Image: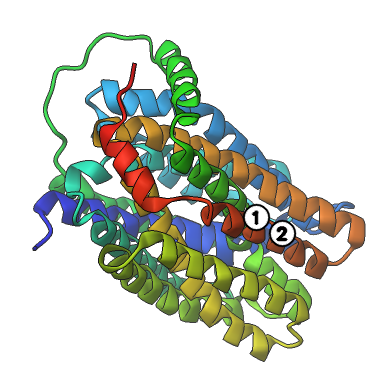
Amino acid sequence: MKPSRSAVGWMFYDFANSSFVTVMVTVVFSVFFANVVAGDRAQGGEYYWSLAISISMTLAAIAAPILGAMADYSRSKKKFLFGFTWLTVTATALLYFVGKGDFVLGMVLFIIANTSFNSALVFYDAFLPEVSTPETIGKISGYGWGLGYIGGLVSLAVSLPLVKNHIRWVWPMIGAHMFLFSLLTFFLLKEKPGKAPKTNYFKVALGRISFTMKHLKNMPDLLGYLLSYFFYNVGIYTVIAFAAIYGENRFQMGQQSLIIFFILAQLTSTLGAVVFGWISDKLNVRFSLSFSLLVWIGVVVWAFFCGSAKEYYALGFFAGLAIGSSQANSRTMLSILTPLDRQAEFFGFYTLVGRISSVIGPFVYGQVTLLSGKQSYAIISLGIFFVLGWILLHRVNLERGKALGKSYVFK
């Protein structure tokens, strides 16, 4: 079935915002911040980068339940989505004024940008049940991720000629990319009409957390999946945040080499998102996600033993496949296990779980690197989180969870 106009608009937001994750969080700005902006600090630039990531994700985690309540009750998901998007755009563009030694200004602007970026995702994810059906949700989610990786690929290609002599122009370029392509979402995505009830969002947020915790104990498969997601997302987010820094410091890869590396990884990420999204609809989303986590375990072990930049390029192909497949299937897995009329509520809790795990990973990575002096020990430590996530995922009974999600009565 052909995706609706709103579904196409929704998917294009992935195309717009993936440039931020790819260029700012993963490939270019992370290395620039660690080596140039904060490179002369005694603790090392990697420590301050992990601190910036952890602070921004902590703020996003605190805000997530309140924003989730706003997504459900305000009837203004679209307005909030673009408000946070444009705040991300502004803070990202202003990073142009950050140079060598300006680590405080750089941290503040990046924290604003990354917090806003992750806050926007609460509203974006809440649209997924509206733009799809139970039969197409895996496909639509996978297509969104796939289009996002293409957006990241485009932004990397445009960044490539700038990084050698005009690297600070990359940040305003990424802001422009997000702004221009998010306009397609603004024009195409339609929000279901309705009158917004007057309510206290903070009170609703606290009530939701209490409500979710109360009912999760009666939904063991959904609870088991959320615990699994918590652990393996620690590893995924940390790899995204530190992969370029790892390549630059361990193999002396320059910015242009790293961009080429991630262009190759984006290609397999696109393939992984689309193909494994299709597999999750046709076969079994748990099987698809489980295979992705096995690939992740292989990736971090290989990264520990990796001995050259050439070998790191080969590793990037498999890392890209793992990222694309696991991220697309994670969103689908939650939707399948959650009652349809409570999806926005549980997506808010899912976002909260994801944000908390995204705080822990960079913190652990930074501390292991600081104490050991070797990033290879930090990268192999992530394998523990992937293994725990894989074990917990296999305790989830998918069919029982789906049936309970359809029949569970909330009281």
Q: Are marks 2 and 1 in contact (CB under 8 Å)?
A: yes
The alpha-carbon separation of the residues under discs 2 and 1 comes to 6 Å
Q: How is the image coloured?
A: rainbow
* Helix, strand or loop status at disc 1: helix
Residue 61 horizontal/vertical position (percent): 55, 33
**Image quadrant assignment for residue 343:** top left
For the point 26% across and 41% down, the residue is 127
Q: Is residue 172 left or right of residue 8?
A: right
Give amino acid for label 2: Ile
Q: Which mark is residue 384?
A: 2
Residue 135 horizontal/vertical position (percent): 19, 55
**Image quadrant assignment for residue 164:** bottom right
Are there few (<14), some (14-19), or many (20+) residues within 10 Å of tag 2? Answer: some
Q: Is residue 322 above or below residue 41?
A: below
Are there few (<14), some (14-19), or many (20+) residues within 10 Å of tag 1? Answer: some
Observer-nearest residue: 266 or 249? 266
Give amino acid for label 1: Leu
Q: Quadrant of the C terminus?
A: top left
**Image quadrant assignment for residue 280:** bottom left
For the point 83% across and 59% down, the residue is 369
Kindly identify which residue carries mark 1. 388
Q: Is residue 196 above or below residue 103?
A: above
